[in-house]
Amino acid sequence: MIYVDFSVVKAILKARYKIYIRYPGWMILNFTLPTFLTAMPLFLAIGITRSIEAANVIFSRYAGTTNFTFYILLGSVIWSISNSLLWDFGMWLYDEMEMGTLEQLFLTPSHSLELLLGSILYTLVISLINSIAGILIAAAILGCLHLVLNLKFLLALGVIAFGFIPLLGMSLVFGALVLRVKEPWAFFNFLSALLLYTSGTFYPITVLPITIRLLAALFPVTIQIAETRTIMLNVGYLFGPDIDFLLLTTYALVWPIFGLAMFERVRNEAQRRGSIGAY
Amino acid sequence: MGGSNTTSSESLVVEARDLWKTYVSKERVGLFKSKVREVQALKGVSLDVYENEIFGLLGPNGAGKTTLIKILTTLLIPDRGYAKVLGFDIVKQSNDVRKRLGVMLMGERALYWKLTGRENLEFFGALYHIPREILSKRIQEIIDFLGIQDFVDRLVETYSSGQRVLLAFAKALVNDAPLLFLDEPTVALDPARSIEIRRKIKQLKGEGKTIFLTTHIMTEAEELCDRVAIIDSGKIVAIGKPEELKRTLRGLSALEVEMSGNNLEYILSQLKALEGVSRAAITYETTERGIIAKLRVLCDSPRDILPIVVDAALQNDLKIWYIKPTEPTLEDVFLYYTGKPLG
């Protein structure tokens, strides 16, 4: 039976938060990235169709909504926040290895579950703050704030937050990879691009070939984006409300357990090989 | 091995028996080819550390010091052998061991640079499950004890190297552990700070703590340690009280020479071949006079060796800055057992 001391969890949360706010550049980037991501396809569409109205008309044939801007904005926000959440744990581990503090953490009597919970809870809280701030800033700049400021947005936030649970499990797998191979950045960049192309951030995934669509359904981000669009714009289910929910719930159960088991296994192996502090 | 000149009534704090560790790494030599490299870091290390003693582990880089410390502090699992720290098995009861250790590893690197010194201490204290009110009091005591109040509330990134080492030392004290592992505690400190830290280490011993330290500064080891172990190529080659170890060199004396010039390695090889010379080694030091070679010869009679050294220096156009026959020090013990100088 593992006893979790929440003062350890709180201490990690607090320390990571303090470090985060002492790098204001990251905060600014996280708050504004969705605006830049949304603006890119927006300008591209205007460039091709000559006006946003014309783009909306053409886009509605595929996506079922004439609000092209808000459609992209929701995808951009969820992708950018989910993407950073997915890698945050691995990045944190890598930073700890580089600073020499990872060994110090493992020298304390805190259980690795407490260390993981602290770090993951921080990621969850910061990701939610970034999601809200990112959507509000982008919506205000792109003229769709009225769509955000309603009760449906709270429900959408609930879906986004629920989707973070399987992502946290995936982030543990990535953390294990950092501990094992030390330099997983090529894999990181590849998977990041794959997620961007397959999750339907900028277009409905129905435009993709069926095999890629099935691959996309394996990523919780795809379902998160689809469900949020359904709530806010009434478009976008992947397979239907029940199957989508069932899939997301399954991922929320499977990924954390798999991630935790894999991380513990790799950590024990690293302890045997003497590679915990190596980077 | 271990326990020389200690009575059985003294309680064992560290008990290591026949510890072996080999690092295995894969090195990619082609797209589909990799080479397995094995490094034997420990080869059957056994030692005992007793309650309330300062135990020094001396050895050159790559001798196995860090591997041994990592095993004893539960960071690394040995391939063979066992160790108990404060009565707990380091593998099976690792958490019980960690609770009771204060560790200073890697000095200044092991800190969060974007937190203040106090925030670092609070953070690590929480990880030792210390209640908040006790922790605040404890941290203040450590700050006063080490005299770090001037900079403890600044971000660590603004600290000098010495200040970071002091904070790392403070961190090792945060859980008030009965056993401290200090890896090169004075390495980046100026002489005044080093003296101060050595005084604090003695004070901690006075408070009943046991201290396991590594150092490559022989005078520090002589001043602080009740017993020392010399480790070389993964093996303990000598262990005992500094005085005891020096006595093992009975009949030998040392000749200390400082010189500069070329052909020093040639002279060294000539000296090593002489009858009556037990060991000889050279270390180099950069000073305001340039690079100075410090030659140390361990021999039966320095008076016989001295003219040979002077002759060789004259023939090779070397400049002698200093020459002196001395009694053997711990440095000579190290040279005697390992055949090489420390540092």
Image: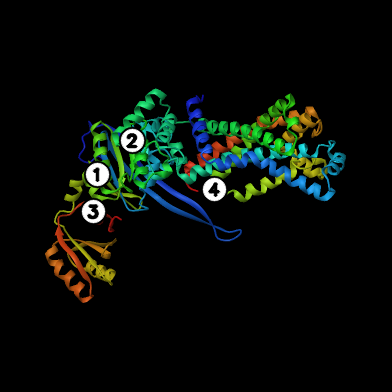
Image vertical order of residue A180 relative to residue B252, above or below: above
Q: CA distance from mark 4 to mark 2?
A: 38 Å
Q: Secondary structure at mark 4?
A: loop
Residue under label 1 = B195
* For marks 3 and 1 on the same chain, the one whose residue lies earlier in the sequence: 1
**Circles 4 and 2: CB distance less than 8 Å?**
no
Q: CA distance from mark 3 to mark 2?
A: 36 Å
Quadrant hosting residue B310: bottom left
Residue B29 lies, in percent from the top left, at 55, 60
Tags 4 and 1 both on a single chain: no
Q: Secondary structure at mark 2?
A: loop
**Circles 3 and 1: CB distance less than 8 Å?**
no
Tags 3 and 2 both on a single chain: yes
Disc 1 marks a residue whose amino acid type is: Ile
Disc 3 marks a residue whose amino acid type is: Glu
Q: CA distance from mark 2 to mark 1?
A: 19 Å
Q: Is residue B237 visible?
A: yes
Residue under label 3 = B331
* For marks 2 and 1 on the same chain, the one whose residue lies earlier in the sequence: 2
Q: Secondary structure at mark 3?
A: helix
Residue under label 4 = A182
Which is more toward the observer, B183 or B277? B183
Q: Is residue B131 visible?
A: no
Q: Nearer the viewer, mark 4 or mark 1?
A: 1
